[in-house]
């Protein structure tokens, strides 16, 4: 019994030493909620912390990252998407509980759905063909995210059987799905690089999309369209005296920017020891002091160029090109196939898509351009809206970032995650609903 009692106390000590300490303070900063996380250093733990905040669509205005030996300290200045402090206690409690458990890692399950991973060469109408195949195979797309970059496409879709409402587990049906989708993706000239995979569980959706595009080497491919002149500027230099590689990223501020950069560094097996994130106007400035997981800095020019290319790609993948169209309507079989076919028949190309289903409602977002990547003709957009339904398909222009001109000099920054004129309450409540933490968000 004595040994057992000692062991219990030792286990309690280990838990106290390894469990992150989280402080959420609304008093120290006049314009933002300050979130402090002290934790034992572990590869990937910074990404987990950033992921908790960005998954709730919070805006990270500033951040300071510092590692001292085996201990790690993160300080985030966060607001809602309207630039306000966090006041909803359910949101604050969720952040605190989630950050306390990040040391143990987090997995995103499929919630009883089957996950489809697709990569290949992008082309006009490809998404329409994919959804048509899935509809023909009696697959209902419940949730999906689609990214395009440098002529490549990556999609992660969660589906269930239309008839039973259950995940698709029959091996013959899975083989048919993979074969049909692979034929669509490869088209006439992408036999080698088109890939499909079916699984029952995945990691974080957006992290997985980054990993898929990284594996597809989209960062090495030439862009189909010429850069807009506002491409991210990435520099990498070695601080020889301290044994760090110093990475600087300067670009336009936007939603989830910090997550995208940290995600890429983490998946490339670099550890962030120190970092400073600031914004000014609509610009974001990120500086990271990194080393390999073995403790060494970047050691060659090809490696340095690869880091630059990969971080530029990470920033560009989520840049929203085209007109944002939001579809809100009753969900039905073949809905996505019908909508995207209408896009294709009218010469609209989908550059990014986010598909979600809540109860019986489909809540979908599409970013569309014309067939060669230029801005779509407003008359064409209106014609498409008339065919799909004016009340169901709406144009949502991205509003400018919201800034606080009256703030103190150090606080005259926009969030790294960008600020869009949306209600934090509805966004956060919806996220908590999908996580099973509340019964309703209406």
Image (cartoon, grey):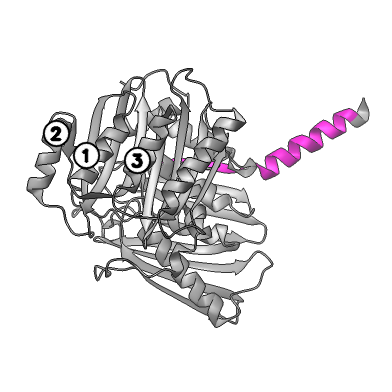
Q: Give the magenta part as a residue range.
A: 4-25
Q: Nearest the camera: 247 or 356?
A: 356
Calculate the distance from the C-alpha at mark 2 to the C-alpha at mark 1.
Answer: 8 Å
Quarter occupied by residue 137: top left
* Picture quarter with the N terminus: top right
Instruction: Name the residue at 52% across, 42% down.
Output: 179
Task: Note whether 217 is above or below 24 in the view shown.
Answer: below
Q: Secondary structure at mark 3?
A: strand
For marks 2 and 1 on the same chain, the one whose residue lies earlier in the sequence: 1
Q: Nearer the viewer, mark 3 or mark 1?
A: 1
For marks 3 and 1 on the same chain, the one whose residue lies earlier in the sequence: 1
For marks 3 and 2 on the same chain, the one whose residue lies earlier in the sequence: 3
Magenta region includes residue 276:
no
Question: Mark 2 highlights which residue?
Answer: 387
Q: Secondary structure at mark 1?
A: helix
Question: Mark 3 highlights which residue?
Answer: 354
Question: Mark 1 highlights which residue?
Answer: 342
| Crowding at mark 2 (Cα within 10 Å: few <14, some 14-19, many 20+) | few
Looking at the rendered structure, the number of numbered marks drawn on it comes to 3
Quarter occupied by residue 282: bottom left
Asked if the residues shown at circle 2 and circle 1 are in contact, with their CB atoms under 8 angstroms apart, the answer is: yes
Instruction: Name the residue at 52% across, 59% down.
Output: 192
Instruction: Name the residue at 25% across, 42% down.
Output: 82
Task: Note whether 135 is above or below 146 in the view shown.
Answer: above
Q: Secondary structure at mark 2?
A: helix
Q: Position of residue 108 (x, y in %)?
A: 54, 37
Asked if the residues shown at circle 3 and circle 1 are in contact, with their CB atoms under 8 angstroms apart, the answer is: no
Magenta region includes residue 18:
yes
Q: Residue 432, which numbered label? A: none
Calculate the distance from the C-alpha at mark 3 to the C-alpha at mark 2.
Answer: 21 Å
In this image, 34 relative to 401: left or right? right
Q: Main secondary structure of the magenta part?
A: helix
């Amino acid at each position: 019994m004595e040994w057992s009692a000692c062991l219990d106390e030792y286990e309690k000590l280990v838990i106290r030493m390894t469990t992150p300490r989280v402080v959420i303070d609304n008093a120290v900063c006049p314009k933002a909620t300050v979130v402090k996380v002290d934790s034992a250093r572990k590869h990937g733990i910074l990404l987990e912390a950033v992921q908790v905040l960005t998954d709730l669509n919070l805006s990270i205005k500033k951040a300071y990252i510092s590692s001292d030996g085996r201990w790690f300290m993160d300080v985030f200045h966060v607001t809602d998407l309207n630039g306000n402090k966090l006041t909803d206690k359910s949101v604050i409690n969720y952040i605190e509980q989630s950050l306390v458990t990040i040391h143990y890692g987090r997995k995103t399950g499929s919630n009883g759905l089957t996950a489809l991973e697709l990569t290949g060469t992008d082309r006009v109408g490809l998404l329409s063909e994919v959804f048509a195949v899935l509809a023909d195979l009696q697959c209902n797309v419940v949730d999906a995210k689609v990214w395009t970059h440098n002529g490549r496409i990556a999609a992660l879709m969660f589906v269930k059987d239309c008839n039973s409402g259950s995940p698709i587990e029959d091996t013959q049906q899975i083989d048919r799905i993979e074969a049909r989708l692979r034929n669509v993706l490869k088209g006439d000239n992408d036999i080698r690089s088109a890939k499909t995979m079916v699984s029952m569980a995945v990691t974080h959706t957006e992290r997985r999309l980054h990993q898929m595009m990284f594996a597809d080497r989209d960062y090495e491919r030439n862009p189909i369209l010429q850069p807009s002149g506002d491409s991210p500027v990435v520099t990498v230099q070695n601080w020889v005296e301290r044994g760090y590689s110093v990475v600087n990223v300067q670009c336009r501020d936007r939603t989830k920017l910090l997550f995208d950069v940290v995600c890429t560094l983490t998946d490339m097996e670099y550890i962030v020891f120190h970092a400073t994130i600031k914004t000014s106007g609509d610009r974001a400035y990120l500086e990271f002091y990194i080393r390999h997981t073995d403790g060494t800095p970047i050691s060659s020019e090809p490696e340095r160029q690869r880091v630059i290319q990969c971080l530029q790609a990470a920033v560009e993948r989520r840049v929203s090109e085209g007109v944002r169209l939001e579809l809100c309507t009753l969900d039905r079989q073949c809905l996505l196939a019908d909508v995207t076919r209408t896009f294709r028949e009218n010469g609209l190309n989908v550059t990014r898509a986010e598909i979600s289903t809540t109860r019986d409602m489909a809540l979908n977002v599409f970013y569309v351009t014309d067939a060669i990547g230029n801005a779509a003709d407003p008359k064409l957009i209106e014609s498409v809206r008339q065919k799909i339904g004016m009340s169901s398909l709406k144009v949502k222009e991205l509003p400018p970032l919201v800034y606080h001109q009256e703030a103190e000099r150090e606080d005259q920054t926009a969030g790294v995650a960008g600020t869009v004129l949306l209600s934090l309450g509805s966004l956060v409540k919806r996220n908590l609903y999908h996580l099973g933490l509340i019964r309703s968000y209406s």
